Image (spheres, grey):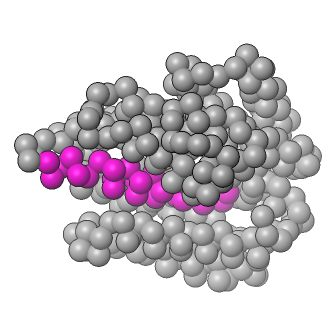
Amino acid sequence: MLSRTADHLYWMARYIERAENMARVLDVTYRMSLVANSAYDETARWKPPVQIADDIEAFEKNYSGYTAVNVIRFMALDERNPSSIVSALNSARENARAVRVAMSSEMWETVNALWLELRQRIRLGLNEADISEFCDWVKSRSHLFRGVTFGTMLRDDSYKFVRLGSFVERADNTARLLDAKYQLLLPAVEAPEGQVDYYEWSSLLRSVSAFEAYQKVFRDTIEPWKVAELLVLRDDMPRSLHACYDELAPILEQLCRQRGRECLRLAGENHARLHYGRMADIFNIGLHQFLQDFILRNNALGAEIQRAFLNGPE
């Protein structure tokens, strides 16, 4: 298939996944901000979403402080922020519009309707009290897009590039979310009273739709290291790093038969680290160091996919 078509499909999927992940981060941050806890001031509560998106410099250039109003505006509605929900969904629609013939009509209608409804919501305004409902709406529309894609798209190379974009983006965002939130919440474990804030840990799990999965797998109270294991090494947890690479590696094996062998090598290396890794070894290295290294490796894979298959740097 044409590299330009592959490029649009890949980035359409990445942008929709990015919008969903930003919605998940905002939602869990808002819910955690409702819990009275003197250990965290407003900056400590609302800075992590900007850190996760790696947009600290852009935020501080345009906003005076890490308040709920400022962060919600920046992460949800600010068109100057390429990682904001509105920017991501606009980019997804533009990419979809460029390759309408490469996807099913239902896929295009879903993306277009998503954008039109978003514009209507923006006109009505978004305040702090509305953020949970707004985030739920973004997540549900992202789920709808994936369901329509799975149910209507021919299993050709176009479909493979859509899936590729989704899982590269999901792996990046899961690693960033776990890294930022783990560092914020871990001091609670070391408090003199030795009590974990279970509500906050459960909010983190809910942000990646993993709360019920945690209960089913561990049948125990929420413990930070088990949360990390679920989101890093469990291959049966859909948003875990391992599960993302279980999807990526076979797709790249099919796409890399004639070119892009370096993509296959990078994906295989990352997959092996997750498939054969042990949490004890990861914690010996340091979870933060492991996740930062994973993010760099995942970004290297994304860059190599761009170089080998797509239409230049994005």
Which stretch appears magenta? 163-191
Q: Is residue 77 magenta?
A: no
Q: Is residue 167 above or below residue 65?
A: below
Locate the N terminus and report the quarter of the image it occupies.
bottom right
Give yes or no for residue 175 being in the magenta stretch: yes
Q: Residue at x 27, y 33 (%)?
A: 37
Choose top left, top right, bottom left or bottom right for residue 151: top right
131, 227: nearer the viewer: 131
The rendered magenta stretch, by its main secondary structure, is classed as: helix
Q: Residue furthest left?
A: 193
Residue 227 in view here: yes
Horizontal side, residue 43 vs residue 13: left or right: left
Q: Is residue 200 above or below residue 296?
A: above
* Residue 41 quadrant: top left
At horizontal 29% and vertical 75% (from top left) the residue drawn is 285
- Residue 90: x and y in percent read 79, 41
Q: Residue at x 64, y 77 (%)?
A: 263
- Residue 106: horizontal and vertical position, in percent? 80, 33
Q: Quadrant of residue 233?
A: bottom left
